[in-house]
Amino acid sequence: MQINVNGENKECSTETSVSKLLESLDIDNRYIAVELNHKIVPRTQFNEMILRENDSLEIVTFVGGG
Amino acid sequence: MEDTVLKLGKYEFNSRLFVGTGKYQTFDIMKEALEASGSEVITVAVRRANIGGKPGESLLDHIDKDKYTILPNTAGCYSADEAVRTALLAREMGISDLIKLEVLGDENTLLPDPVDTLKATETLVKEGFTVLVYTSDDPIAAKRLQDAGATSVMPAGAPIGSGQGILNPNNIRIILETLSVPIIVDAGVGTASDVTVAMELGCEGVLLNTGIALAKDPVKMARAMKLACESGRLAHLSGRIPKKLYANASSPLKDF
């Protein structure tokens, strides 16, 4: 199925959790926050939150700034 | 001379210099500069994660989180809604409930949007954040942000990254006289004397990034900024002499 991650279309299998997705995208999950369809997904729900067709995710982290 | 600690909500700091982590050529130079600055609070920005980023590339891998308090910012936000969303995402990372709130008006001036800055302050205070808010040097706007519950109000000395110093010390003085929350000058600082001027005026701290990061030798400049901050603070606490029009000899004027 198709989902959108940080503005890019991605393919993933059904029953993919947020944790699985992060793993498959090689995203270092220590310092990130995730929004699913504009709602924050608490870190404690990464394992159980299952993605659906056309879901839109924003995955953010800290970068250098002033 | 003994100084008191700087209290920002539940946080206490000995250093009054806050520094950013942007624009450094390498993480190593950044680390050295942070160390030389003596800062205890460092700012970071929130951006989309790099898909496929390798472990070890994260900014936070290069920062000792036991040593520094992380102050996430909402840089690059142009509305209250965007800034609130960014702050919530920053807090979700589980490192800090501090937020350096900035809501900008446009890309050329990077001046704050006063209306949306106030709205976002109100919302984030309700959400339980410790809000340090970037504003212009307008004393009325500053007062409104204090009234909205900001923990610290942070007037710009000059536009962000401009290095022009404290353009209107009179406004900063009025803000210092009118408000009771800690005032931290944020933005516009170009060199050491700019930091000293802010501290001599009685500001509780200075926040800067570009002045160090883009100096030819960022590590040396970081040390200069540290000393300048301490000097300015000491001078403020010492009570300077009044300015006079005529001379006042330092040596006795009498004959032998």
Image (tube, rainbow, N blue to C red):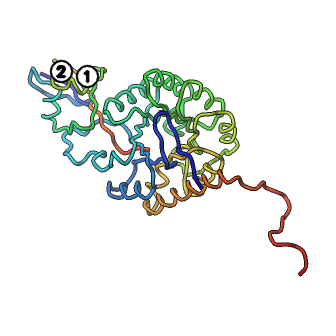
Indicate whether B95 appears above or below B13: above
Front residue of this view, candidates B91 and B240 = B240
Quick check: B64 left or right of A51?
A: right
Where residue B18 sits in the image (x, y, percent)? 48, 47
* Secondary structure of residue under mark 1: strand
* Secondary structure of residue under mark 2: loop
Quick check: B192 left or right of B65?
A: right
Where residue B86 sits in the image (x, y, percent)? 38, 30
Q: In which quarter of the image is residue A50?
A: top left
Is residue A59 visible to the viewer in this orientation of the structure? yes
Q: Residue at x 89, y 81 (%)?
A: B256
Where residue A28 sits in the image (x, y, percent)? 20, 39
Indicate whether B21 appears above or below B96: below
Indicate the amino acid at tag 2: Met
Which residue is the site of mark 2? Answer: A49
Q: Residue at x 40, y 50 (%)?
A: B23
- Identify the chain of the residue marked 1, using the numbered disc in the image: A
Where residue B50 sits in the image (x, y, percent)? 25, 40
Which residue is the site of mark 1? Answer: A36
Furthest toward the bottom, the residue is B256
Is residue B76 visible to the viewer in this orientation of the structure? no
Q: Using the image, tell me which numbered label, if any, was put on residue A4.
A: none
Number of labelled discs? 2
Q: Which residue is drawn at 36% across and 58% down?
A: B29
Quick check: B210 left or right of A15?
A: right
Q: Which residue is drawn at 60% across and 54% down?
A: B196
Indicate the amino acid at tag 1: Leu
Comparing labels 1 and 2, the label whose residue is closer to the camera? 2
